[in-house]
Amino acid sequence: MAEEEAAEKPTEAKEEVKRDENTVFVGKKGVMGYVLAVVTQFNNGAPSVLIKARGKLISRAVDVAEIVRNRFLPEIKVEDITIKTEELTSEDGSMSKVSAIEITLVK
């Protein structure tokens, strides 16, 4: 029984990776690193790429999308922009709300 459970876990992990395969999470690195990640996804045949960011990094996500569209891949279009508020639990257990954005780029 334990062997069956162990065999199922890698499959679940693969499905999760596959779901986020064309997603770029914007963090604290330089903008061009994320631009390269998006361009690489499109060059590897991805039909669309989702750029996600939260809080103060939202402006960096917008910069990434605009640099990709204006400098590197002018044929790319913005399909959708979703804004939302996410509730996060901090280390001390308190809940805080943070803004989030998802930008979908398509060929």
Image (tube, rainbow, N blue to C red):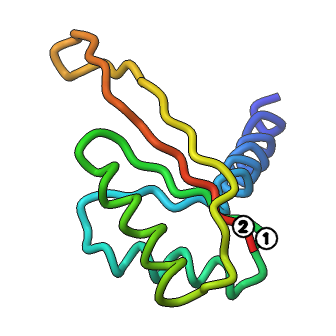
Q: How many marks?
A: 2
Left or right? Give the position of 63 relative to 45: left
Q: Residue at x 50, y 77 (%)?
A: 37
Quadrant assignment, res 21: bottom right
Q: Residue at x 16, y 15 (%)?
A: 92
Q: Residue at x 31, y 73 (%)?
A: 31
Q: Is mark 2 on a helix, strand or loop?
A: strand
Quadrant assignment, res 55: top left
* Residue in the foreground of this view, choosing between 11 and 71: 71
Judging by the rendered image, the residue that carries numbered circle 2 is 106
Is 53 situated above or below 3?
below
Front tag of 1 and 2 = 2
Judging by the rendered image, the residue that carries numbered circle 1 is 47
Position in image of residue 25 (x %, y %): 45, 56
Crowding around mark 2 (Cα neighbors within 10 Å: few <14, some 14 to 19, many 20+) is some
Q: Which residue in the rendered view is the most extreme toward the left?
A: 92
Is 33 situated above or below 97?
below
Residue kind at label 1, given as amino acid type: Pro
Is 101 situated above or below 90?
below
